[in-house]
Image (tube, grey):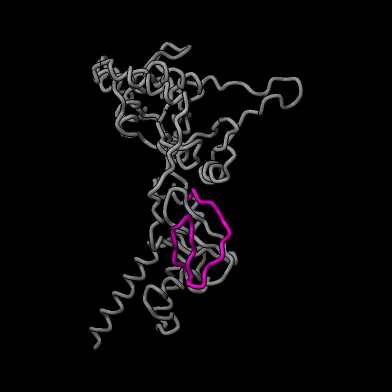
Amino acid sequence: MLYSVVDDRSGAAYQEYRLVYGEDVEAALRFFFNAMSPKSVEGFPFQGIPEIIYMDNGPIARSRVFYRVMHERLGIEIRTHMPRDKGGRRTTSRAKGKVERPFLTVKEVHETLYHFHEPSSEEEANAWLMNYLLRYNGQKHRSEPHSRIEDWVGNLPPSGLRKMCAWERFCTFAREPERRTVGIDARIGVDGVFYQVDEELTGREVIVWWGLLSDEIFVEFADQKFGPYRPVNGPIPINRYRAFRKTETQKRAERIEDLAGKLSLPQEALTEDPRAPESLLIKLREDIPLKEFDDPDPFNELRFPSIIAAKRAIAAHIHQPLARLGKDELDAIERIVQTTLVKKEVIARVQELFGKTHRKSETEE
């Protein structure tokens, strides 16, 4: 399947191939992350978190996970066109021409070359597609006297581009809630994969937040979140597949494939650009500021939710209750949690505190 996103004004496009069965939300989230992240290819500055995404009413737009990640976590407004014949006599459904035009161009200009050289993998197909997109975005704008990518760079908002977060943080946003009952062995099974949770959750009906893009889960019970938990075993392998009878369309496609194999074309038509390399090097203007990503941290992975939770974590880190500590140590811990609740800072300062305390005790002895 070919995923595509097109800028409304300039017509600059970014596309990727994804090997999926139908409109898959996980593949769509991976594609949007790559589209909004900086590209490793020189001369392709297309990036940033947009304010609005306009799309059709397919399964992806109706997905709760997709809406939660895009709207609630990244602050993107999702707009969809109205279904056909909704609202009376007016025509409400129309083709999204700015998206469909690059689709047709890729299929008619680029994919026809696959009859001569077929990509061996999804990675190779995306590499060839990226090489073509450099030339596509470098073509003339539909109404301005410059290229599409130059129009995109020249009309960025004065406030700048909103930077995309890291892939690890993006994976924590794509989570789906599901009610499950924890087994007597304190395990939860999700799609054949089992997770070992805290013993206090044994036999409880909990809400499992399982990730679409990662193998970690969080468990919510009584307004508290536990985790993350990692799998303790792998899924059950499936080694048998049913062979379906080929249709007439598939047989005709195989005959066309055999005929296409007899034709030839130099592979350089897909991997090289006949123009000068300098004409493809488009970079962001230096006066465009980049906004840092505002991390919502919905599962309290970066900060402690409260001072009490921070003190519990400190007690678990030093392997003893805080009530057994001296007054000076308790006062120091109180100053730490009153100053910051960032997990890395709290643990680092606690390690420094007890390292100094331990050395002082040895000196006194």
- Spot occupied by residue 44 in the image (x, y as percentages of width and height): 35, 27
Q: Quadrant of the N terminus?
A: top left
Q: Is residue 212 left or right of residue 275?
A: right
Asked whether residue 189 is in view, the answer is: yes
Residue 84: quadrant of the picture: top right
Q: Quadrant of the C terminus?
A: bottom left
Check residue 338 for magenta coloring: no
- Spot occupied by residue 333 in the image (x, y as percentages of width and height): 42, 73
Check residue 193 for magenta coloring: yes
Task: Note whether 239 is above or below 220 in the view shown.
Answer: above
- Count numbered badges in the picture: 0
Q: Residue at x 48, y 18 (%)?
A: 101
Q: Main secondary structure of the magenta part?
A: strand
Specify start and end residues of the magenta stretch as a single range: 173-197
Q: Nearer the viewer, residue 233 or 68?
A: 233
- Spot occupied by residue 49 in the image (x, y as percentages of width and height): 47, 36
Asked whether residue 278 is in view, the answer is: no
Farthest residue, direction bottom = 365
Residue 48: quadrant of the picture: top left
Q: Is residue 313 left or right of residue 130?
A: right
Task: Note whether 160 is above or below 254 in the view shown.
Answer: below
Q: Nearer the viewer, residue 314 or 98?
A: 98
